[in-house]
Structures are given as C-alpha cells and as structure tokens.
Image: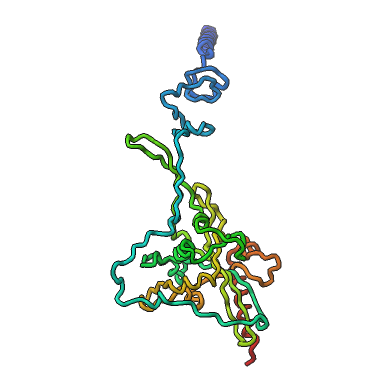
Amino acid sequence: MRTRSLKWILFAATLIITGTSFSQTKKRTTKKKTTSTSGYSTYGGNQTNTGSSYGNTNKKDTTANPNNGGSSYGANYSSLGRDTTLPIEVIKNTSGGLLDTTKMSLRNDAGIEQNLIKDKSPLAYENIREDDAVYRVRVWREIDAREKLNLPFRYAATEDNGNQRFISILVRAIKDGEITAFDAGDDRFTTPITPDAAIAAFGSGYDTVPKYDRDGNIAGYQVREKAVDPDSIYKFRIKEEWIFDKESSRLFVRILGIAPVVGRKLSNGDPIPNSEGPVWWVYYPDVRPVFAKAQVYNPKNFGARMSWEDLFESRMFSSYIIKSSFDNPYDVDLAAVYPNSTLFRLLEGERIKDKIFNYEQSLWQY
C-alpha cells in the first residue's frame, strides 16, 4: 500500500515539473522586432538598418561616391563616370588595320635584278564566239586559306610593294584606285562603293577612350575604330563560268569575280554565329593586271615564283563548291538545301564538279 502511494506521488511531481517548464518556454518565445539583414523581410518597410535595399524607400546618400553600387543598370549615362558634357572626337582608321606603311628598300633587296614581274601583263584570253558556247554552267566556290595548299594566301611578309597577304593586295589595289569594289548586296557588280566604304565594310567595331590634358584631367573622349586583323580574313568566294567551245572542243573556265568572306560582328566587335558572307566583290578581269605584278609565295623555291594571275588561271588552289546553276531554279546555296549537314554539301559539290567534267568526256568516243 505504501509502495502504491509513493508511485502516485512521483507521478504527480513529474506532471507539475513538466507544466512549469512548458510555461517558461512559451514566455521566452515572444515575437521579436525584425532587424533582418535581408531585404526580403523588409519589403515595403521603412527601415534604414538593412543590408539590402530591395523594397526600401530610403535613398542612400551617394554624394561622396556617385558610383556607389554594384550595378549601373537603368542608371543615367553620366552616373557611369563619363562626363557627357565633354567633347567626343571620332577618329577613323583609313586602313582598318589591313594596310601598313611600307618602307621602300634603299638598296636592292635581292641577289638579282627583278624587273620581269614589274613589267608583266596578263595573257589575253582566247576568244569564244557566242554561237560556239554550246554549254555553260555558273559555279560559286570558296577558298579556305587555312588549308595547306592555300597557305600562300596568308603569306605575311612585307616587300617593296607592300604586305604580301592576298587580302592586303586586294585592299591596296582598291585604295590606290586600280580596281573598283562593288557592293555585296548582289554579285552582278551593279553598285560600286568607295575605297573607304570597302575598308569600313569589314566592321571591326569601335572603342571609346578618354583624352587627357597636361594636368591629367579628362578633356574629352575619342571614338576609335578597331583595327582588323588580316589573318582573320581567310575565306574568299569565287564566281566563275565553265564554257564548252564547240569550235575547239574544249572546256574553258572564266573567273568573273572574287570576294573576301567574313562573319558579321556586333558594334562591340563580337562575332555573330553563322553570319559569314561576302564583304564586297571585285571584277576579276579588272584585277588581272594587279595580280600579274604580284608574286605568290613558293615554299620550296623562292626563285620559281608565279604571279597571282598564273595561280588562278592554272587553278593552283583548293576550293569547294557552295552553289551552281545546276538544277537550281530557286537560286539558293547548298547551305540552304542542306542546312544541317556540311558533309552533304561537300558531296553535292563534288557531284556538280563531276557532272561538269563528265560532260566534256562524254562528247568523245574512243
């Protein structure tokens, strides 16, 4: 009996202690005032003691440091640290980085006198009568100077007639007025453009730099056109016609135009993906005299160098077909026919090439 009474006493004491602890804990969990360092807890509030200003209607004093902020999105142009009241000078780059000042050699920079190339002129084409041209096919192809056979297109040495890159030869001839560049809007040579427009068409972008006075203060700003890297221009497009002359029973090729191909860029100079296209066109018969006086780099024998006119007439380059007049009523490139497969484009180009040469072979009987 005594044992049962002790058990009830212990049970009652346990209940009393538990109830007391619970009431004390409840008193301690009263709601505290919010002084959070997160802006989300003060959304719409008026607190000034917050680490974030999200939803905060109070404005910080930025007199001492007007650029005191991690982001300038939506800010006034003058808040970026650039004084809009100062003059801005636009400086154009007349060569675009494609032409360098060439210093002439004061002595003969060769072991022999080189006069033949200076007096060389292109060979006249064999005349083809219109009635004898019983078969004609128009072809567009591209030359990639990164291929081993086409490395002479990127020969970067400087000689008395300037830099020897192929693109530099073209730009120099346009700048000197020897040839005319035509707008790339179409490849029929309909709209001539000025030399400055031809250089600006490469679209290298612009840089804005401050201009300082003698005291080290910013006196104005200069907007300079970025120089074009000549090595970034490594593709060239050729427009040509293959003609079968029934009088001589031969297949002739006549190049009509050449165009440098580059990818388009934004105003800051960043490239736009899948935007390659011709910059401008030059009429090949007009540029032949220029090519006849410019030598091609020969990696094996510096004394046996052909001219660029010889290279094109002898077909000493590697290329692939990107468009033709064969079964092409919509006048589209192979890239539009096979947009997702470069392999199919190459195979279709090879099929077109075989069809042209097989036409000549099929006219003969053995």
Residue drawn at the location 53% of the way across and 70% of the way down:
286
**Camera sees residue 253:** yes
**Camera sees residue 10:** no
Q: Nearer the viewer, residue 30 or 312?
A: 312
Q: Nearer the viewer, residue 320 or 199?
A: 199
Residue 70 location (% of width, % of height): 46, 32
Residue 339 location (% of width, % of height): 63, 61
Residue 8 location (% of width, % of height): 55, 9
Q: Which quadrant holds the N terminus? A: top right
Residue drawn at the location 50% of the way across and 34% of the way down:
77
Q: Is residue 183 left or right of residue 205?
A: right
Q: Is residue 299 left or right of residue 354?
A: left
Residue drawn at the location 47% of the way across and 22% of the way down:
60
Q: Which quadrant holds the C terminus? A: bottom right
Question: Measured along the vertical axis of the image, is residue 346 above or below residue 7?
Answer: below
Question: Measured along the vertical axis of the image, is residue 273 above or below residue 72?
Answer: below
Q: Nearer the viewer, residue 163 or 290?
A: 290
Applied colour scheme: rainbow
Q: Residue furthest right?
A: 329
Q: Residue furthest front?
A: 177
Residue 252 location (% of width, % of height): 58, 80
The answer to which quarter of the image holds residue 192 is bottom right
Count of all numbered marks drawn on residues in the image: 0
